[in-house]
């Protein structure tokens, strides 16, 4: 699942002591395991070996160039949702011809940029977007490759903010309308129909929704293949990960919680491969969180311990601006000290940050080993939707990022300094 473990009672990422990272780089800092990312990619790729397939990593999960280069070298294409993400892929020597461009509101500048660099396909979300892209392609004298995103109206069982495959969501075109959309596309001289796409949500921990969505769209896919000669069927991403689990350890019981089992690669493949094999098409999939989520942690140091009449707080130097998932999604992240605790029991505390918001917390009423000022802790499973959603709220500089391989680590993003906070601003009033 990941490469974080205690060795001689100190938390390591692969062969690197995380306290050494904090001492050299400071806190808060994101730390990623290259070995974990590569292992997750290889295992998913192998599980789909019976299919002609391409894994397109969802850049929005973690867009650091070092991570993109790592996955590109492993063979990944990229699922992008903005011109900025395409820029990042190109900066990491990724191939634009293996990029699918999704998103409900692509701008003219983004579309022109993608056409210029020859992305593999635009995933379209509406008939209006089709007409818009056709006009832009015509003005440039090129044909734009497209696939419509089909909304199969499947319940994915995930958080309502990250479900995308229901009729009430803003994404995709309903099954009963998509045939008309393809008919319109086929009449446009500057449009090239290349495939069909769907995506039903994120952090899905059962195989059933994926299988159900494929079953609901199979007849449509075969119909489009016959009518338009489509090349691919993209089944999206959404594979969930374990956020609540047990670290490998030889002592203590405070983290032995009820493990939440995520969908395994084997179960996922068993549920989808037989049906997809029959289509005779290239299969694209767009995982993000699955590849990088458990590969990263956010290291943060306890600034103060505070006791009120009702609660005890550990106030750490990371805040909701660094990792917003607990505040935004009420999501759970394991939090562990970098020094393996003795079997000395636990206390119930809130782990909170310094941001001026009551929603600035990482854990509430959490059973933790005793913590003290200066202790270093790791917020686990922070490799996806961590740094990419960070902000300068409260005028806090963005944290650093570090990549580990074996016994070595490298700074892959410098920590912002105060001068960065006003770079590009103008302080002259009208």
Image (cartoon, rainbow, N blue to C red):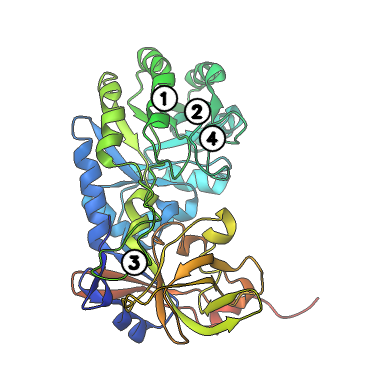
Q: Residue at x 31, y 76 (%)?
A: 340
Instruction: Pick whichever of labels 4 and 2 is earlier in the sequence.
Output: 4
**Going by the image, does 182 lie left or right of 246?**
right
Residue 423: name its quadrant: bottom right
Q: Earlier in the sequence, mark 3 or mark 2?
A: 2
Q: Nearer the viewer, mark 4 or mark 3?
A: 3
Q: Is residue 20 left or right of residue 306?
A: left
Q: Front-most of 383 and 266?
A: 266
Query: Could you classify mark 4 by the number of other residues whose Cα lies within 10 Å: few (under 14), some (14-19), or many (20 or more)?
Result: many
Q: Pointer 2 and pointer 1: residues touching (CB < 8 Å)?
A: yes
Give the foreground label among 3 and 2. Answer: 3
**Quarter assignment of residue 10:** bottom left
Identify the element where label 3 is drawn. Answer: loop
- Residue 414, given in percent of the width and then of the height, sits at 41, 77
What's the CA distance linking mark 3 and mark 1? 39 Å
Residue behind mark 4: 133
The one nearer the camera, 350 or 281, is: 350
Question: Taking 267 as reference, is 118 left or right?
Answer: right
Q: Are marks 3 and 1 in contact (CB under 8 Å)?
A: no
In the rendered image, the vertical position of residue 178 relative to residue 244, given as above or below:
above
Task: Tell me which label, 1 or 4, sits earlier in the chain.
Answer: 4
Which numbered disc, 3 or 1, marks the residue closer to the eye?
3
Q: Which residue is mark 2?
A: 154
- Percent of width and height locating residue 54: 28, 38
Q: Determine whether the residue tagged by mark 4 lies in a helix, strand or loop.
A: helix
Expressed as whole percent of the image width and height from the top left, the position of residue 402 reads 34, 72
Write the residue at 51% across / 78% down. Answer: 316
Which badge, 4 or 3, is on the more N-terminal residue?
A: 4
């Amino acid at each position: 699942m990941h490469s974080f473990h205690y060795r001689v009672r100190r938390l390591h990422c692969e062969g690197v002591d995380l306290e050494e990272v904090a001492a050299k780089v400071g806190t808060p800092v994101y730390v990623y395991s290259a070995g974990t990312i590569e292992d997750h990619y290889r295992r998913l790729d192998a599980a789909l070996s019976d299919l002609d397939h391409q894994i397109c990593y969802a850049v929005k999960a973690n867009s650091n160039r070092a991570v993109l280069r790592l996955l590109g070298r492993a063979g990944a294409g990229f699922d992008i949702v903005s011109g900025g993400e395409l820029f990042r892929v190109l900066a990491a020597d990724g191939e634009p011809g293996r990029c699918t461009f999704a998103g409900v509101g692509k701008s003219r500048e983004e579309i022109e940029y993608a056409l210029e660099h020859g992305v593999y396909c635009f995933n379209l979300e509406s008939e209006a977007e089709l007409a818009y892209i056709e006009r832009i392609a015509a003005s440039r004298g090129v044909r734009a490759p497209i696939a419509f995103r089909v909304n199969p109206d499947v319940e994915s069982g995930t958080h309502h903010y990250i479900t995308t495959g229901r009729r009430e969501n803003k994404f995709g075109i309903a099954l009963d309308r998509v045939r008309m959309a393809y008919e319109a596309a086929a009449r446009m001289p500057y449009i090239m129909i290349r495939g069909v796409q769907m995506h039903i949500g994120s952090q899905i921990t059962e195989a059933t929704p994926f299988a159900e969505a494929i079953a609901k769209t199979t007849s449509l896919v075969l119909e489009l293949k016959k009518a338009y000669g489509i090349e691919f069927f993209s089944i999206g991403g959404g594979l969930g990960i374990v956020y609540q689990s047990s670290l490998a350890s030889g002592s203590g019981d405070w983290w032995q919680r009820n493990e939440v089992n995520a969908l395994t690669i084997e179960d996922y493949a068993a549920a989808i491969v037989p049906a997809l094999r029959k289509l005779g098409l290239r299969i694209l999939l767009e995982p993000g969180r699955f590849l990088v989520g458990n590969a990263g942690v956010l290291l943060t140091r306890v600034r103060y311990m505070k006791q009120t009449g009702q609660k005890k707080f550990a106030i750490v130097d990371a805040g909701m601006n660094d990792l917003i998932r607990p505040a935004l999604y009420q999501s759970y992240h394991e939090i562990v000290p970098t020094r393996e605790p003795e079997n000395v029991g636990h206390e119930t505390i809130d782990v909170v940050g310094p941001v001026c918001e009551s929603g600035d917390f990482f854990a509430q009423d959490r059973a933790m080993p005793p913590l003290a000022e200066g202790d270093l802790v790791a917020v686990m499973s922070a490799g996806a939707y961590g740094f990419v959603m960070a902000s300068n709220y409260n005028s806090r500089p963005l944290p650093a990022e570090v990549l580990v391989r074996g016994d070595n680590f490298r700074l892959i993003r410098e920590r912002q300094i105060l001068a960065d906070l006003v770079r590009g601003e103008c302080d002259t009033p009208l």
